[in-house]
Image (tube, rainbow, N blue to C red):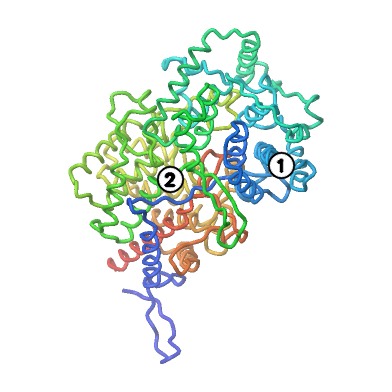
Amino acid sequence: MMTAGSFNSQDGSVRAQPRFGRLDLGLDRISNGIERATEWLLGEQQPDGYWCGELEADSMLESDYIFMHTLLGTGDRGRMERAVNEILRQQNEDGGWSNYPGGPSNVSYGVKAYLALKLMGYSADHPVLVKARESVLRLGGVVECNTFTKIYLCALGQYDYDAVPAVPPEIVLFPNWFYFNIYEISSWSRGILVPLSIIYAKKPFKKIPAEQGIEELFVGGRAGANLHLRWDRRRFVSWRNFFLFTDRVAHWAERVHIRPLRKRALKKAERWMLERFERTDGLGAIYPAMLNAIVALRYLGYSADDPQVIRAMDEFEKLGIDCPEGTPGDPTPTFRMQPCFSPVWDTAQVLSTLGDAGVPKDDPRMVRAAEWLLSKEVRHKGDWAEKVRNVEPGGWYFEFNNEFYPDVDDTGEVLLALRAAQSPRERYQHEVEQRAIDWIFAMQCKGGGWAAFDKDNTKTIFQYIPFADHNAMLDPPTVDITGRILEMLAAYGYTRRDPRVEQAIQFVLKEQEPDGSWFGRWGVNYLYGTFLVLRGLEAMGYWNHEPAIQQAAEWIRMVQNGDGGWGETCGSYDDPGTRGIGPSTPSQTAWAVLGLLAAGDIRSDSVAKGVRWLIDRQRPEGTWDEAAERGNGESVYTGTGFPRVFYLAYHLYRHYFPLLALTTYRRAMEREEAAA
């Protein structure tokens, strides 16, 4: 075995160094880091066997929380006041609010925050609101907000129902064979829009005091503002103009009360919503759908003490994190909302990572986690079955309970995790795994890739519908999910000889960007997509000397920061020219290292520097801190809800992805040493 040498000043001899690079650390220090991170994660396990980190989002959640309770005359005043502190904490220097820390101010977020603060007693001449108003007006004022914001404003008399895009409940009456049926839009939009259509039909209105209004946020004043959507004047014949025309017709029908199917539509929308309350923790188990469902129930005539309303409100309030005594290092009382819970996702990621770190399969903590995951298997057909017929239910969802909406990404990760632990019910576990794999194959899209919740949810025409301005109407196949599924299928013995696998490989190869990277739909961004594709291709035995792999590895090396880490901001969704550019973070540095290792690069200075970056920034208890890297206490958002619209900070990402990178690196080094 060849080794590098270094001079030993004690005795003048040459001391042997590990052969894996002049910038690398010894495996003993890496192993120590792995051990500390492993113990910390095991200490975070809940008694039932799962892990669930905080899922942090933006100020919109707190603003909408105040709006909903104001509209309904409900809520805890103390919590709402503490929510104000959370809103103020997230205000930008220019007075606005953004959808991720460090991002540009967003007009819809600014209007919602401004209204929330006014509802809580802030006056228009308060310095906070003066700056906020300047920001909103600079961005075009209220008329530039999205549809969801405008409908909420209508409910408090701050906008005109006639000027917002129509969301008629009649959409639920379209049969599944009809081109424009609700199952052709994404599952999350479906859960948001069905109750919103009830709200639109019922047109709730609550008069608020004039001093709480937002008249001053209209450029030139509300009276003279053109509130209606603008036509596409560049092309008279366009999908936008077609849908705007149908929108005008819908509004005309509303005004003259020509709604022959309205009663039937409302009944079906109500039934659809109530059915999806079952076997779930609120509609869709996600914040906006749950909020809309509560408002819809109340305006359908359900009383505040109706069991359905009580249950819906309880599930909604569970998403809150109340800190009346403040947080460590900041005594300011705060209340913040999470968009949902992530226990299945976090548990699967942690269990898989701990298995890689060497925790035995029969360790009681591993078995308990596997048993908890097995208990969350989906056994009832959900919305996905509207397009995927004659397939037995299987798979997993993201949250604690959400039977109608299992997703391919969670299912793939859970299957990987189950390889790391062995349930005492070995035969049962095998049956569950096989059901899930069969379900995943049934969900494969035409082009060979996989989407999250639905199959072939790709009709781009839906993006032109006026109420689709939240940019989340579709759920197309993505390379990051497909890469994970390839990795999982390889773990269960599938190879390229299976035509479904080969089709998936061709899908990701076709989606590669000219610079070698891959777009990341569910994580920020190209670093996320690239590492998952490379791991999937490596698992399937795709030769790492192929140009696609080497080009991807070179791109990762090219965007490495000078400090040895990697980072990328949510801004790369708006400007792809900034892909791979941003302050280094533990999670994204781990993704980059994992990508390079999957590409066969285990000896470059890039890998060595990345590993050193992770080890040097590991805290004594074995964790990492992404907030500290920014230096301002704010979390870094490396998770993606909807590109360009909604982003997330998974608080456990910064812990389990670095651990996975270190264990993968150690294993690669040990193989090299054994082969030498």
Q: Where 585 falls versus 285 (above or below)?
A: below
Q: Where 53 falls versus 510 (above or below)?
A: below
Residue 261 appears at what percent x and percent y?
A: 51, 10
Between marks 1 and 2, how big is the CA–CA gap?
34 Å
User: Which element is circle 1 on?
Assistant: loop
Q: Which amino acid type corresponds to the residue marked 1 in the rendered image? A: Gly
Residue 234 seen in render: no
Give the camera-side residue of 235 and 264. Answer: 264
| Circle on res. 230 | none
What residue do we see at 40% from left, 31% from top?
447
Q: Where 536 falls versus 593 (above or below)?
A: above
**Farthest residue, direction front:** 305
Q: Which is more foreground, mark 1 or mark 2?
A: 1
**Farthest residue, direction bottom:** 11
Q: Quadrant of residue 40?
A: bottom left
> Can you identify the residue that label 1 sits on?
121
Q: Earlier in the sequence, mark 1 or mark 2?
A: 1
| Circle on res. 342 | 2
- For the N terminus, the image quarter is bottom left
User: Which element is circle 2 on?
Assistant: loop
Q: Which amino acid type corresponds to the residue marked 2 in the rendered image? A: Ser
Residue 496 appears at what percent x and percent y?
A: 29, 41
Give the camera-side residue of 340 and 334. Answer: 334
What residue do we see at 62% from left, 40% from top?
63
Question: Dot 2, how many residues are within 10 Å of its Cα: few (below 14), some (14-19), or many (20+)?
Answer: some
